[in-house]
Amino acid sequence: MDKLSNCAIFPGSFDPFTAGHESVVRRALPLFDKIIIGIGDNNSKKEFLSLEKRLAIIKKVFADEPKIDVKIYSGLTVDFCKNNNCKFILRGLRTSADFEFERAIGQTNKLLENKIETVFILTLPEHTFISSSIVRDIIKNKGDLSKFLPKGIDETDLK
């Protein structure tokens, strides 16, 4: 625990992974030596896409980026950080409501593990309204996904 690296965990359910998620990760790349996208296995949420499908989609999005790894995890995010030798948790903020929610989680994580810092990146204005739940609704109603998913990902990847 004394030798945590300049690595960040970007945790989330990513059900599905959106253009906003991708933007946050790509914009954070210069800040870290490595970013691990941690797909949280949350049994209390009803999943839309399987964990394996989310893993495959995110790996496809970042196939060209050697500084990014994608893993599935369960349990506390700070424990996932420690197990992967990372000293940062990366989070994207869309709205002031996101900030209040993320601040509480960040402060809790700081109490659980003082050596791990939470870093926030603001979403780009064009991504502020995009959420996984909105994208799920567009998918369910067979709408145009091109502005909501990362380039190269389409409805065929979601099946």
Image (cartoon, grey):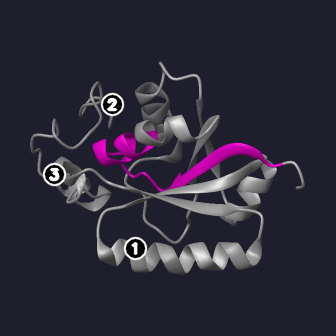
Q: Position of residue 100 (x, y in %)?
A: 41, 80
Rendering coords of residue 101 (x, y %): 44, 78
Nearer to me, 44 or 85: 85
Q: CA distance from mark 1 to mark 3?
A: 25 Å
- Disc 2 and disc 1: Cα gap in Å? 31 Å
CA–CA distance in space, label 3 to label 2: 15 Å
Kindly identify the residue that appears in the image at 77 percent across and 71 percent down. 114
- Nearer the observer: mark 1 or 3; the answer is 1
Q: Earlier in the sequence, mark 1 or mark 3?
A: 1
Residue 139: x percent and y percent? Answer: 20, 47
Numbered tag placed on residue 138 in the rendering: 3
Q: Is residue 22 magenta?
A: yes
Q: Start and end of the magenta stretch?
A: 4-25
Q: Which mark is residue 99?
A: 1
Q: Residue at x 69, y 66 (%)?
A: 76
Dot 1 amino acid type: Phe
